[in-house]
């Protein structure tokens, strides 16, 4: 419910979403209430259609250039402080980003308290909550414009989309931020940026 509420309250920053075929916003965001969540179709155990990200079409573009090139293009400059991909327990693939987050923060000499923003993949609500808690990130700075639960999960593009959302969030907030995602088989990836 929080992901949908954040997405509904968030007007996409200029440039974050490029209009395609007349679409200018993610189509999945809705007013999700407890009563509707209770009626959601059960997929397995406590996983329902209300707490699972919708498979979506989408694409993300991330271009990494030198600071000099960015200034010549008059583009906003953010520095990559680090990135990491780490393996986790294969039977708990959703928690794999925690190891990547811990590694990238430690390598950069940062802690979760140093972050102003975080984009953590929300394939499932419980998975996202476990990653945020496991990494010790303040939930108030996570997915402030809504995550994949509200905006859809285009598999294969979600990591780039998280990086784009983080970039635009840091343009507003300044400071440093983190993007993290899990992959099948127990892999986790994290990116640390500084505005």
Image (cartoon, helix red, strand yellow):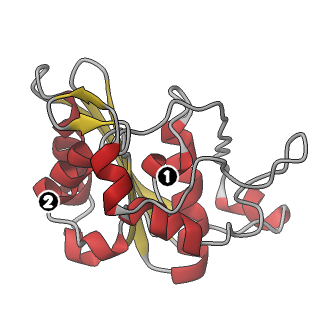
Mark 1 highlights which residue?
A: 150
| Horizontal side, residue 154 vs residue 136: left or right | right
| Alpha carbons under labels 2 and 1: distance apart | 20 Å
Question: Relative to 188, is 2 above or below?
Answer: below
Can you see residue 145?
no
Can you see residue 176?
yes
Picture coordinates of residue 126 (x, y %)?
21, 46
Of marks 2 and 1, the one in the foreground = 1
- Element marked by disc 2: helix
| Figure quadrant of the N terminus | bottom left
Question: Relative to 178, is 103 above or below?
Answer: above
Mark 2 highlights which residue?
A: 133
Q: Which residue is drawn at the image coordinates 49% and 35% (left, top)?
A: 54
Q: Which residue is drawn at the image coordinates 77% and 65% (left, top)?
A: 75
User: Which label's residue is closer to the chain start, 2 or 1?
Assistant: 2
Question: Relative to 46, is 75 above or below?
Answer: below
Picture coordinates of residue 28 (x, y %)?
58, 47
Please identify the quarter of the rendering in which residue 87 is found: top left
> Which one is in front, 83 or 32?
32
Q: Which residue is drawn at the image coordinates 14% and 20% (left, top)?
A: 90
| Horizontal side, residue 35 vs residue 94: left or right | right
Picture coordinates of residue 86 (x, y %)?
22, 33
């Amino acid at each position: 419910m929080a992901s949908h509420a954040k997405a509904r309250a968030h007007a996409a920053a200029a440039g974050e979403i490029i209009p395609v075929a007349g679409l200018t916003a993610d189509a999945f965001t809705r007013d999700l209430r407890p009563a509707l969540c209770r009626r959601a179709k059960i997929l397995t155990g406590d996983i329902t259609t209300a707490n699972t990200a919708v498979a979506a079409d989408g694409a993300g573009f991330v271009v990494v250039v030198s600071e000099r090139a960015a200034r010549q293009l008059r583009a906003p400059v953010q520095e990559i402080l680090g990135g990491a991909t780490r393996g986790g327990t294969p039977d708990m693939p959703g928690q794999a980003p925690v190891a990547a987050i811990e590694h990238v923060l430690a390598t950069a000499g940062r802690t979760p308290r140093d972050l102003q923003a975080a984009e953590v993949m929300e394939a499932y609500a419980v998975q996202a909550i476990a990653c945020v808690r496991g990494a010790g990130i303040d939930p108030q700075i996570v997915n402030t414009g809504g995550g994949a639960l509200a905006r859809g999960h285009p598999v294969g593009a979600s990591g780039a989309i998280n990086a784009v959302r983080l970039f635009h969030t840091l343009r507003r907030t300044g400071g440093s931020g983190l993007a993290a995602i899990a992959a099948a088989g127990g892999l986790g990836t994290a990116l640390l940026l500084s505005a």
